[in-house]
Amino acid sequence: MYPSGQYGLTAIFVLNFLYLIRFIIHQVMSEETSTEEQSTKKDTKKGAKAEMSFLDHLETLRWHIIKSALAICIFATLAYIYSDFVWNSIIIPPKEHDFWSSRMLIQFSNFLGLHSNGLNVHPIQLINFNLSGQFMVDLWTAVIGGFIIAFPYVVYQFWSFIKPALYENERKHASGAVAVMSGLFLIGVLFGYYFIAPFTLDWLGNYSISKAVVNQISILSYISSVTSIVIASGISFELPVVVYFLSKVGLLTPRFMRKYRRHAYVLLLVFAAIIAPPDVLSLTIVTIPLIILYEIGVFISIRVDKANKRRLENI
């Protein structure tokens, strides 16, 4: 029922991406070692860790992945146990007319002196085609919920894998990385849930090419759309963190981000059009936060670039 091959390829890509990040950080940081850092015991221990073989890195990564998978399984089990609450209080409401986003849209329209009926005036009617359909969807939803809830711990495991590649002063500056990444992901998930998902459901759920065609939305299609929107929104809000790490290893500079700002805006608009319905209001709601995140990334890149230059001057 689900494209397991696709997720398998995604998992392989993620594993290689994580190892690549750690390898790059090791290489860059080893070239910028200062005399003071080389003379300390901490750096001696760190240098020993940096000499780990490829198989040692993979073994370390394997245990971090196992711990993350166990955390996801635990929270997925809890989500499955409380599936009634998850479905009736979290998943189903975005398609209803009295959802928070719909009520806020009506109030905002009234404040501007405009008229709006809100969202999902005609709520989507969900149906199930397969005998095991509802069970499989419930199971899959529990896994997604487990991942979202366990995300801070997964980030912590990711950080524990990357952390040995950093020097002591780098660790201090990035001590709040787990909290920042978790917070940004949570904000992105909430943004996708309260803003992108209701507008998408309203537009696509009521789109019709002819009165002769009746929309009968399967529960699988509904949950796939909602979860993909929420997860994509959460990941997109990690843009400042990605900019920080790329700037730290010298792969991204403020000059580059400023020079190609217009191109970036176009790409952000395309990305917004993918995860949101193609109407002006929805595109605006999704694009503006992405642009703000990009500008925050420019500011972060400037700060990191200055710090890198100061460190090189002190060597």
Image (spheres, rainbow, N blue to C red):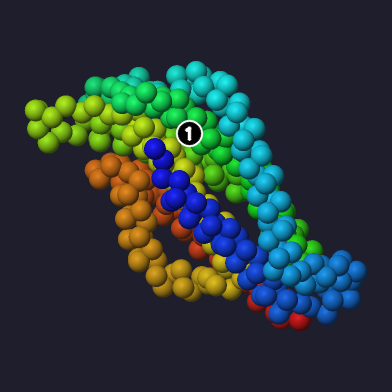
In the rendered image of this protein, does residue 287 appear above or below residue 45? above
Residue at image coords 41%, 25%:
132
The x, y position of residue 112, in whole percent, is 28, 31
Q: Is residue 292 left or right of residue 242?
A: left
At horizontal 50% and vertical 51% (from top left) the residue drawn is 8
Q: Which residue is mark 1?
A: 140
Tell me which amino acid carries mark 1: Trp
Apparent side of residue 133 relative to residue 76 in the rendered image (left or right): left
Residue 250 percent across, percent down from the top left: 58, 73
Residue nearest the viewer, comparing 235 with 216: 216
In which image quadrant can residue 44 be found? bottom right
Report if residue 30 is visible in the image. yes
Q: Is residue 128 above or below residue 197?
A: above
Q: Position of residue 307 (x, y in %)?
A: 66, 70
Extreme residue toward the front, this view: 131
Left or right side of 104 for 155: right
Is the residue 192 above or below the residue 206 in the image?
Answer: below
Q: Toward the viewer: 163 or 285?
A: 163
Badge 1 local density, few (<14 within 10 Å), some, or many (20+)? Answer: some
127 or 129: nearer the eye? 129
Whether residue 91 is visible: no
Asked if residue 277 is positioned above or below residue 300 in the image, the reply reads above
Q: Which residue is painted at 35% across and 46% down in the image?
A: 275
Image quadrant in which you'd find residue 56: bottom right
Quarter of the picture holding the N terminus: top left
Q: Residue at x 80, y 67 (%)?
A: 49
For the C terminus, give its image quadrant. Answer: bottom right
Count of numbered marks: 1
Give residue 289's position: percent from left, percent from top. Answer: 42, 48
Dot 1 falls on a residue whose secondary structure is: helix
